[in-house]
Image (cartoon, rainbow, N blue to C red):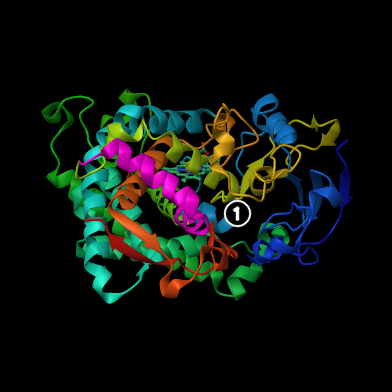
Amino acid sequence: MVHYQMVFQTWWEAKLPSLTTKAANNRKSRTQPIIGSPLFPFPVQKYGSLVLLQFGAIPVLIVSSADAAREIMRTHDLNFAYRHAFRVQAKLLYNYKDLALSPYGEFWRQLKSIFVLKLLSNKMVQSFHSIREEETSILVKRITDHIPSGPVNLRNMLPEFTNYVVCRSACGGNYTQSENGKKFWDLLKEMSELMGAVGIPDFYPWLSWITRVNGLDKRVDSFVKRMDDFLEGMIGERLETRKDEQDVGEGNRDNFLDILIDMYKAGNTSGVSMDKDGIKAMLLNVFLAGVDSTATVMEWVMTELLRHPTVMEKLQNEIRQIVKDKQDVKDHDIQKMHYLKAVMKETLRYHPPIPIILRRQGTNDVKIKGYDVKAGTLVMINNWAIGRDPRFWDEPETFQPERFFNSSIDFKGLDFELIPFGGGRRGCPGTAFSIATIEFVLANLLHKFNWELPDGAQGRDLDMTENLMGTLHREIPLTVVATQIK
Ligand code: HEM
């Protein structure tokens, strides 16, 4: 029986958001797992899997069970296909010209089909294998060069790696290690911080003067101008130097920017109205959604492998048996690595980088699990709690990749017990891209190096505190000792 509690609280009365959770550390002492989430510490056992809060003017429904998520993302998917955008986010993303924030409708459908069919199609993801290979070699070299000077800080290296992979796929080769690349990276980091700015006017629109007085509006406006100047320069330069589509051949573009510029130049004849702001918003979507989330998963996988040496050994054995005496792991080797795939699923279950998925209900009132939910309700799907729900997962607090053997459960958005990439119409279009990147680099890192914690520390001593800053990552960066395999 699902309990449905009406908890009316004002925004500041709610215990929100305690951005850092020490819950993971306390877990050891618990006999009964308590499911809350880093953002919403409402144990399911106490409050039920549907909790309704009132944040100022906005009713907010927190959903913490696979059953209810299924009703939202499948049964009523059309009604919940709206994304809630906070004011700062909308400003930063060209007022809904991007895919992630654009309201559900014809324009969103066009953008989604560009993402799914053109930018991130399976063919495109495969075609990026040379980027994955080259950037992985650079990362391996950086780690190798670093070995004599001591432990490696993966928090520094992994996001830089994913940024380069995303950057080359999105913009072509010029924006990685160059001066412009560095400038873009700094701008993106600043933007990620600003994306988390949720102000009182988001919940109390009549208090919109507050962000004028406290300087937030000014900071955001100045940032928007700097980012826009940068992107304008990038597009202008590409327009001058690029070859026309007929010269490279239709379908032969190797990066998102050129594909988007082709659409912009084709005008409405391509069936999509893409203007320059649309190009910029789409590019920003790719960076904001793709870089940090992908690096966060890699850091969690390495953390869990260090905490579970037998899992690490089993995975390294699998990789080394498949690769044999070849120098490098290749894309086609990955398909044979079943244990690696189980480790990926288990990590995404236990550490979803986006622990809360934001949706907004459309114009109809609906019933979820028999309870009335009013039009316009902001829905937060508590993906983190769903992945640890003891009603579905045996020993949910144990990291156990073997649970996925002989199980058809996958993270592609059809099994609502495991939704790190969301599901339904608004599900993540970057799943294949990020999985291909993570599996490839991990297989190589585990093939080429052995890994330990510094100073003889044991995996069980690792501090597992989580911190939500854009994505849910380790509070303390993971520092490791790498030893190269001869
Ligand atoms: C491990 C990596 C990633 C994770 C965990 C992740 C997770 C998610 C989640 C949970 C959503 C919301 C889905 C929903 O509402 O049902 C989402 C949406 C989205 N993701 Fe990802 N993502 C990842 C990588 C990427 C990458 C690499 C890209 C692009 C290159 C990307 C682009 C997007 C976009 C554009 C949306 C909005 C889709 C829409 O509103 O229709 N993501 N992602």
Residue at horizontal 29%, vertical 31%? Answer: 332
Q: Left of 372 or right of it: where is 469? A: left
Magenta span: 300-325
Q: Which residue is disc 1 drawn over?
A: 86
Left/right placement of residue 111 relative to residue 163 reads: right
Q: Residue at x 44, y 55 (%)?
A: 302
Task: Quarter of the image for the N terminus: give it.
Answer: top right
Nearest the viewer among 133 and 182 is: 133
Magenta-drawn stretch contains 313 = yes
Query: How many marks overall?
Result: 1
Looking at the image, residue 243 sits to the left or right of residue 308; the answer is: left
Q: Specify whether residue 316 is painted magenta.
A: yes
Pointer 1 local density, CA inside 10 Å: few below 14, some 14–19, many at least 20: some
Q: Residue at x 64, y 64 (%)?
A: 199
351 shown above or below 433: below
Q: Quadrant of residue 248?
A: top left
Residue 356 drawn at (x, y percent): 63, 49
Q: For residue 264, say whether it is visible.
A: no
Q: Position of residue 164 (x, y in %)?
A: 29, 53
Q: Main secondary structure of the magenta part?
A: helix
Picture coordinates of residue 403, whole percent (x, y): 59, 37
The amino acid type, in three-letter code, at marker 1 is Phe
Quarter assignment of residue 126: top left
Label 1 residue SS: loop
Residue 67 x, y percent position in the rendering = 74, 32
